[in-house]
Structures are given as structure tokens and as C-alpha cells.
Image (cartoon, helix red, strand yellow):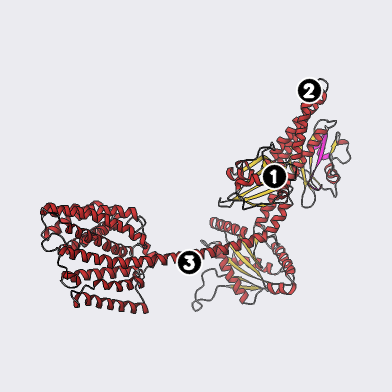
Amino acid sequence: MTRNGLLSSLGFGVLFAVAVLVGRLTILDGTSLSLVWPAAGVATLWFSVQREQRTLPLDLALLAGITVTGNLLTGAAPTLAAAFVGVNVVQVLVFHRLFALFGSHLWGAGGWAPMSSIRDLGGITVAALVASTAGAGLGSLALALTSGSFSGQAAAVWFARNVVAVLLVTVVGLRLTWLGTPAARAALGPRLRDRLELPRGGRLVEFVLTLLLSSGAYVLVFLVINGVPIGFSLLVITVWVAVRYPTTQVLLYSTAGGIFAVAATLADHGPFATVASDAVQALVIQFYILVLAGTGLLLALGRDDRVLLVTRLGVQAEENARQRRLLQVALDEVERSDELNTAVLDTAGVGIVVCDAEGRLLRFNDEARRWHGLDADASLDPTQHGDVYGLFRADGRTPLPAAEVPLHRAMADGSVSDAEMVIATTGRDPMLVVCTGRVVRTEDGRRLGAVVVMQDVTRDRARERALREAHGDLGAAHAELAARSRELSRHVVEVETLARATRAVVGADDPRQAICEAMLDLTGADGAYLLQPDENGVLVSTASVGLPPGLRLRTDPRTQSSLPAMVMAGREQLFVADVAAHPAASADFIAACGTVSGVWQPVLLPGGRATGVLGVFWQSRMPAITSTLSALLQGLAGEVAHTVERQDLLARLAEAAQHDALTGLTNRRQWDTIAQAEVARATRTGVPLTFMIVDLDHFKRFNDTFGHLQGDELLRGFAGAASQQLREVDTLARWGGEEFCVALPGCTAIEAIVVADRIRGVVPQGQTCTIGIAQWRPEETPAQVLGRADSALYRGKQSGRDLSVVAPALPPRPLRDAPSQELLTSS
């Protein structure tokens, strides 16, 4: 129990005591029944507001004590006062439970929302009716036991007055107490005037006139025209108030009207004072208050429902517009990169299939479209892929279940490797493909979809089947063809070895190294290596097994004669039994590796272009290699070509995702990552860090004068020239359009001026640029530093362009206090 909860309970106790005394002062003549009983509403309001304070035992004790004391002080018998305690407790607890059941989201029932709909009012009404029924039944029973007789009219009055009190006092009280909650401050504003929704301007004049008119009408009906039954005509004003003013004001207006009607009736004034029977009079006045308050509240809440609906529709419309704008931006970005991605994917010699996070197809490359005979259809349910695209298990007869489709397996398991299936479409021979793929995720782990690469192994598998079938036929004639059978058995072993090697290569993290290891497993040789041309055309070893530690092979076909260079140029396999006797052999390599015999196999891409050479050497003489081994070496070289090409493709895709397509510089997305890392490093080490924003001057005018192609050439030329002025640790990125960003770790703003001036001095084609410079300050984000650099750039533009402008090191003070700390330099 908190201090605030205790004070709140005591406050409600005092309010309940006042309500008990007021109710006891309205006791009907000759009965123990009060005309109105506001204490019933105060009690339900009390326990609703205190629901979360955990003061229930204290609240029950206060309720019982105040009920007994109030009734005894106003003349009630002790037994009747005790009975009233039980009646109040039962009524409060029933309402407490039902209110939480029907309106758990509302303030007072466990939530934080105000009552704002007719449905909310219906829930609290049901709770009030059931609780009042229980209270009236028990109260009437208590009166009957103490007086010796039961009165139906008394029970009806008890029920009516409690229903009205619970509804009116509880609804008004919950509305007013909600205005003090954090939820109300967040929804309506921090000021009390805003939360009360008081009218202003012309609405204030209207509100004052309405109060004056209604006050006059009430005085006229209840005090001047005494006894004439026209009280319900005041509903017209109530309807006007409910339509024109906020719900809080409607509640207060209805409460005030009810209080005035009760007070006038108790003073024997007004249309209800003429009712002869006290019980009937009590029922009529309760009915009047209920109709008066209920009409106003229903109209106000109905209006609130409509306003809330319109607001939600407006918010939804704004959100839809925002989503459309974001979608358009994404579509524009996709359109710019789609041409490059399509070209890269379509040049691969494998089938590539891409799906989204729900498994729906997004893209086929050219090979995949040709194999399936259809393009990717995003409207298909993923369970239909097998039927529509003719997918079968490896036996070629059993339809492939949806769960076994490689794309779906990659989505479910995160990756798939060496999954075999048959593609059988109308008008084409069935194809056996091996599938490898994985799920694609964002940096934060969110799944974007999956990509699967399919490799056509139909001919390889056909060759394997032919060899196995031949081996079976030769087994029947083993005695006659024993030698041939043994040879074929070796062939099968070699093919299986090739299959294992192929799977190892496809699934390896470093396929080039796996290729060399597979070569040793396949040939039984002492060493193997893979040579590939570098950017200058020099053949260098990119992987090796069995070579002396630290030895890296290198041969330049343009200036050196060598066995690998011969194979690379001739694009045919070469076996040399006596390497030392061959005129193109390298004596140094023979001495270093002890090479006696060797075979060199070109690695050919589709179309016959050589992309490398596989070399295998033995340290003992090999008189020849079998035709099967020769064919297997060629097959493995084909796997090498596909694997290397696939790895290079993935590397190019990764490179394209981080670099600008026009200039080759770091792009905006990668810049954000680098800038964040540089700020983190500067925070950790304390070394200075400076950012620069570079903008080519009058670039639009240059484009308009010389054309966009020349403008692109200017951007490329500037990117290359500016890169030459930077260190390896520096970063130059294309920010967008003609703007570039530079990160200079370990460099102060003053030192950066020298770099900026160098960059300004190398702008090609006689053009100039303006540079804004800002040194990072602790606790600044990259965006804040770039914002200061951008402001400095803007000031350089205003000062005539072709300038290097340093942003102030500290926030600038007004000019009358100190001169600006900005530094401008020009060439």
C-alpha cells in the first residue's frame, strides 16, 4: 500500500460519508428509504479508482464504518445500519467484478482508456443493473425484517435510485479522475484547460448563452410554473448540449440538471412535487434523471464513436499514403539496380530461382526460365510450384511434394545442399538438376527470402548410369571379360570419387582449396594446384596441396614459356610422363617439388573461354593416364569452372551491393556502416575524426551544356582523381548526385583542409568543387557531424564556391558576443 493510495482511500471515505449524510437527509416520510442515494455511486467510483492501489481491505473497513456511523447518526436502528453495511459491500463487489469483466480496457476497470463508445456505456450499465438488483433485493429484505412488512414500491425505489446513482456518479467520476491520468495528458494535452475541453472564442459565447438559457428554463419549469408536468421538455436543451459540446461537459451538465430537479422536488417545487405518493414520486424523479443523463450521454458517445472512426480512417489514409511513397522510393531504387542484377544473373551458367519471405517466386534467370519453360509467377501459392513447373523426385516419376522443393527446404531449414530433382516440362527432355541454396537475411536478421542455384547434371548422371549398366552387363561375362570388368570397376570408383569431390567442392567454404584436395583424391598424385590469371593476366596459384610451405607459383604467359601457359593458350589437356625432359618445364619448380610426371587440365567456361589451369604432379614416374581418368579430370575441371564462376558471381553481387555503379566508390548504404564504425573507433581510442562533404559546382549547368554522358564522365574522373589524394585508411563515398562524402580517421579539421585543397585542385575538365569540413565531437552521431559539414558546405556555396569551409568547433554564439569560428580557404 503506497502513501498516495492511502490518502486516496481516506479522501474517498470522506466523500462517501458526505454522500451518506446527504442521502439520509432525503428519507421519505414514514419510511427508512431515501429519495436519492448518491453514496451508491460514490462507493462504486471509490472501488473502481482504487482498483490498482491494493487498498481493498482498508476500503472495505472504511465503507463499513462510515455506513454504520452515518445511518446511526441520522436515526437508523443499529440492526438496520448493520444490514446496510452488507448491502453496500455486496453491491460494490458485484459492480467491481462485472465492470472489470465487461470493460477491462477502461479506466477504473483495469485499463487506461476513457469511456468513449455506446458499447462501453452498455457494459457499465449492465454492471450497474445487476449490482443494483442485488443491493435492492438485500436492502428490501433488510427493511422487511426490521419493519415486519415488505413493500414492493420501496424495493423499486431502492433499485431505481441505486441504478441512477451508480450510473451517473460513477460515469462522471471516472471521466473526471481519468483527466488526471498520464493517458489523458498524452491524449488531450498537459494543460487542465485542454483536458477539460473548455470552449474558446465563439464557442465560449455559445456555451455561456446555452448555460443561461438552460438555467432560465430549469427555473421556469421547477420554480415558476409550479406543478405543471412539463419537466421532460428540458430534454430538448440536453440534446442540444450533447450534440454541440464535449462528453465531459455533457456529463457535468446532466449531473447539474439532475441535482437541480431533486433539490426542487425536495423543496416541494416543480412538476414532480405534485405526485401524491412518496414512492411514486421517487420513481418518477429517478426516471427523469436517468432519461436526462442517459439521452445526453448516448448522443455524446455516439458522436465520439463517429469522430473516432473518422480519425482512424484519416490516420489509415495517411499511413497508406506514406506506405505508397515508401514503395515508390523502393521501386525507383530497384529499377536502378535491376538492370545490373539481371545482366549478372543471366550470364551465369546455372539456373537461379529467388523467392520472397513468404515463399512466393520473385525471379528466374534466363537458364531457369528456359529449363522450366515458364517465368516466375508470384501469384502462385508455394504449394503449387511442383505441379506448375513440372518438378519430380530424382527417379523422374514421383511428383515432388511441396515440402521437398529445394526452395521451400532452404526457407524451412536455412539452407539446402546437393538436393536432386527432375524438371520435366512439355516439349523438353527431363533434366536432372542438383540444387544448392540458402535463406537471405538483412543485417538485423530479418528474413528477406531465399535463393537457390540449380546445376544441370543430366549428362553426368546419364554417363554414370551408363557406366553402372555396362558394369552390370560385364559382370555376367566376368570369366570372358575379366580385364574389362576390372577396368570398368575402376571407372565406377573414379566416377563416385568425382561425385564425392564435386559435392565437396560445391559445399566447401573455400572451393578452390577443395578442388585441389579433390584432385589428389581422384588421381592419387603427390600434389595439385590451381592457377588463375590476375588482373594483369599473370597466372598465379590461388590454391594448392602438396607444395612446399610458402611456395606460390607464378608465370607470365606474355614473357615466360611454361606448361600451364601452353595449356591455357591451347585449351586442351596435356600429360607429360617426363616433365624434366619437356622444353617448357620450369627447372625451379621441378627442383622445389620433386616433380617427375604431371598433367595439366584447362578450366573452361561455357563458350570455351579458359579461366584457369589445374595442375597435378607425381614424384614417381607415371607412364600414362587412363582415358577414364582423363575424362574425369575434364569433368572435375567443368565443376571447377561452375564453382569458381558461381563464387565469383556471389562476390560480384556482394561488391555491387556496396559500391556505386557509376563511379565504383563506396555507395550511400555502405557509407552509413563505415561512418558508424569510424565514430565507434574514435569514441573508443580518442583519436580525431573528420568528415567532409564535397559538391561539384554548377554540375547541373555542366550537364545542360555538355550532356549527361559527359556529366557521368566528369563524375567518374573526379572519383578517380580524388581517390588518389587520400590515404588507404580514408574513405571516399558517393553521397548522391554530384555530392561525395569523405571520412578522415586520425585527422583534425585543420589537417583536413590540406586534403580538401588537394581534392579541389584535381577536379577534371576545368570544373571546381566546394567542400564542407566538420570534426567529430564526442557523443555526436555521424548524421550530426555530416549535418554540420553540410551547413559549412552551404556557407561555402554562398561565399562564391570553390572553397574549403570548416564548420565551427563549438556551437556558434550570437555575432554580438563573439566572431564566427568558421574557417574558409580557397585556392
Among the two numbered marks 2 and 1 on one chain, the one whose residue lies closer to the N terminus: 1
Residue 127 point in image, percent of width and height:
29, 56
Specify the farthest residue to the top. Answer: 479
Q: Is residue 582 visible to the viewer in this orientation of the structure?
A: yes
Circle number at residue 314: 3
Residue 423 spot, x, y in % from top left: 70, 43
For badge 2, the amino acid type reads Ala
Q: Which comes sooner in the sequence, label 3 or label 2?
A: 3
Q: Callout 2: helix, strand or loop?
A: helix
Mark 1, secondary structure of its residue? strand
* Magenta range: 587-610
The answer to whether 628 is drawn above or below residue 361 in the figure is above
State the quadrant of the C terminus.
bottom right
Residue 240 located within the stretch drawn in magenta: no
The circle on residue 476 is 2
Calculate the distance from the C-alpha at mark 2 to the C-alpha at mark 1: 38 Å
What is the C-alpha distance between the residues marked 3 and 2? 83 Å
